[in-house]
């Protein structure tokens, strides 16, 4: 691994919190992610199931966690199942976890080889009343394939039709939303690496570069600083490309006089950072670009002030929409008279503000949690207002990662240059 060992006390606490929320006489089962075929005999680089990592710290494929907190035998209450190391396989893929190493990482003493999972799981399930399993529950995204957990759930329903099947995802969502101190430290390390990436592109971007060359500078800096890589596919969008929200082709030339919108973040120990900056390709903003940038920056500061305990993302979005109206009028995109005539269902600001201003951040860049979730201390969210004017081939978005605190919030990216004067100064050095 590229990161320092995470204290196993974190994973022990996480499991205890989960166990305390299960109904009496229940078993919970969490599988690792599948290895995903890339082509031929090659897999894509492996990334662990975030829920399993949260509970165990184990990054190896073919791993299963089984919790049965109320089992009368202590050695059945928390169990981890891993594949048995095979010297022949290890000669191709490198060392796999043995039981001692898995215990050191996870803090789980009762570790079995994977082939024993079926018989042991059947034993504890028959002594339980409820079975908790996870499934993919993001509202706006549903993959075409079933996860290992979902396939296993289908088997459970056939084999144990009289047991109560329970959803584990809502409980894990609640737990993962409020970060432990160790998790915040990892996020802040990802933020630090991400800042290094931005500093690097400020000193290298110039007219005539390809967008993918900018991406390469980020990749180099992330790798150099020990990140696993990008937390998500980076958006490096010059000119009109910045008006495409999830533009990831990154294959066009950065032209003199254009703006470059870069949305990027490092992944460190599976925790994500998420940053967006918009800079002038030639190092200087035009007067019109300054006006639009200043408008976005003002909205950013006002939106950030709204991220406090007791509110929700939905409420923040509603307030930010009103703030954008004022800025759009100032920029001459429409008039106050136009606002009086606008449709309530499709307000005018939505023509130029195409997305919400915030999402949760953690083990996933779009982390668990809904827009109706009441914000509490320990939650981490993005603040990312954007303005998109296709007619002017201009898109500007500014994004920082914000920690909710008891008395307001803390900007984890306050050291990442954002004022346009500072950006120009750094680019001219």
Image: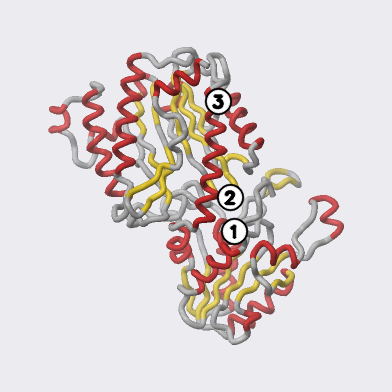
Give how far apart the Cα atoms at labels 3 and 2 are: 24 Å
Q: Residues within 10 Å of mark 1 (few under 14, many from 20)?
A: many
Q: Residues within 10 Å of mark 2 (few under 14, many from 20)?
A: many
Do callouts 1 and 2 mark residues in contact (Cβ within 8 Å)?
yes
Asked whether the viewer can see residue 162, the reply is: no
Tell me the quarter of the picture where residue 120 sits: bottom right
- In this figure, what is the number of numbered marks? 3
Q: Is residue 400 above or below residue 47?
A: above
First along the sequence among labels 1 and 2? 1
Q: Is residue 208 left or right of residue 296?
A: right
**Residue 285 or residue 63, whichever sits in front:** 285
Mark 3 element type: helix
Residue at image mark 3: 201
The picture places residue 224, in percent across and down from the top left corner, at 66, 35
The picture places residue 34, in percent across and down from the top left corner, at 64, 56
Give how far apart the Cα atoms at labels 1 and 2 are: 8 Å
**Residue 246 or residue 332, whichever sits in front:** 332
First along the sequence among labels 3 and 2? 3
Mark 1 element type: helix
Q: Is residue 310 left or right of residue 120?
A: left
Residue at image mark 2: 270
Asked whether the viewer can see residue 203, the reply is: yes
Residue drawn at the location 55% of the way across and 24% of the way down: 211
First along the sequence among labels 3 and 1? 1
Do callouts 3 and 1 mark residues in contact (Cβ within 8 Å)?
no
Q: Is residue 320 above or below residue 161?
A: above
In front: mark 3 or mark 1?
3
Give how far apart the Cα atoms at labels 3 and 1 are: 32 Å
Q: Residues within 10 Å of mark 3 (few under 14, many from 20)?
A: many
Residue at image mark 1: 53
The picture places residue 413, in percent across and down from the top left corner, at 45, 38
């Amino acid at each position: 691994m590229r990161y320092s060992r995470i204290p196993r006390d974190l994973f022990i606490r996480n499991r205890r919190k989960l166990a305390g929320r299960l109904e009496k006489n229940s078993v919970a089962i969490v599988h690792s992610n599948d290895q995903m075929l890339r082509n031929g005999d090659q897999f894509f680089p492996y990334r662990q199931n975030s829920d399993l990592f949260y509970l165990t710290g184990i990054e190896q494929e073919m791993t299963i966690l089984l919790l049965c907190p109320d089992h009368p035998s202590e050695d059945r209450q928390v169990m981890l199942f891993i594949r048995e190391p095979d010297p022949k396989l290890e000669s191709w893929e490198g060392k796999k976890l043995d039981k001692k190493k898995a215990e050191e990482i996870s803090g789980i003493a009762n570790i079995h080889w994977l082939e024993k999972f079926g018989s042991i799981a059947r034993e504890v399930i028959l002594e339980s009343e409820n079975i908790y399993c996870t499934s993919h529950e993001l509202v706006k995204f549903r993959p075409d394939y079933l996860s290992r957990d979902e396939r296993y759930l289908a088997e459970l329903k056939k084999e144990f039709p009289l047991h109560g099947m329970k959803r584990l995802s809502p409980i894990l969502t609640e737990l993962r939303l409020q970060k432990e101190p160790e998790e915040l430290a990892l996020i802040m390390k990802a933020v630090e690496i991400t800042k290094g990436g931005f500093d690097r592109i400020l000193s290298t971007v110039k007219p005539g570069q390809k967008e993918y060359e900018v991406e390469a500078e980020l990749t180099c800096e992330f790798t150099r600083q020990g990140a696993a890589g990008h937390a998500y596919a980076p958006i490096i969008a010059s000119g009109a490309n910045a008006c495409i929200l999830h533009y990831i082709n990154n294959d066009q030339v950065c032209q003199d006089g254009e703006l470059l919108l870069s949305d990027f973040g490092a992944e460190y120990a599976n925790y994500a950072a998420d940053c967006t900056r918009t800079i002038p390709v030639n190092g200087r903003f035009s007067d019109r670009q300054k006006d639009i940038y200043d408008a976005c920056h003002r909205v950013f500061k006002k939106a950030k002030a709204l991220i406090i305990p007791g509110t929700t993302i939905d409420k923040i979005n509603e307030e930010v929409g009103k703030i954008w109206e004022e800025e759009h009028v100032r920029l001459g995109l429409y008039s106050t008279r136009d606002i009086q005539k606008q449709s309530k269902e499709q307000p005018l600001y939505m023509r130029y503000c195409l997305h919400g201003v915030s999402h949760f951040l953690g083990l996933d860049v779009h982390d668990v949690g809904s827009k109706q979730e009441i914000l509490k201390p320990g939650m981490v969210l993005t603040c990312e207002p954007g303005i998109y004017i296709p007619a002017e081939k201009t898109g500007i978005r500014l994004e920082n990662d914000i920690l909710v605190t008891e008395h307001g919030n803390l900007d984890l990216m306050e050291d990442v240059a954002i004022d346009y004067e500072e950006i120009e100064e750094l680019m001219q050095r």
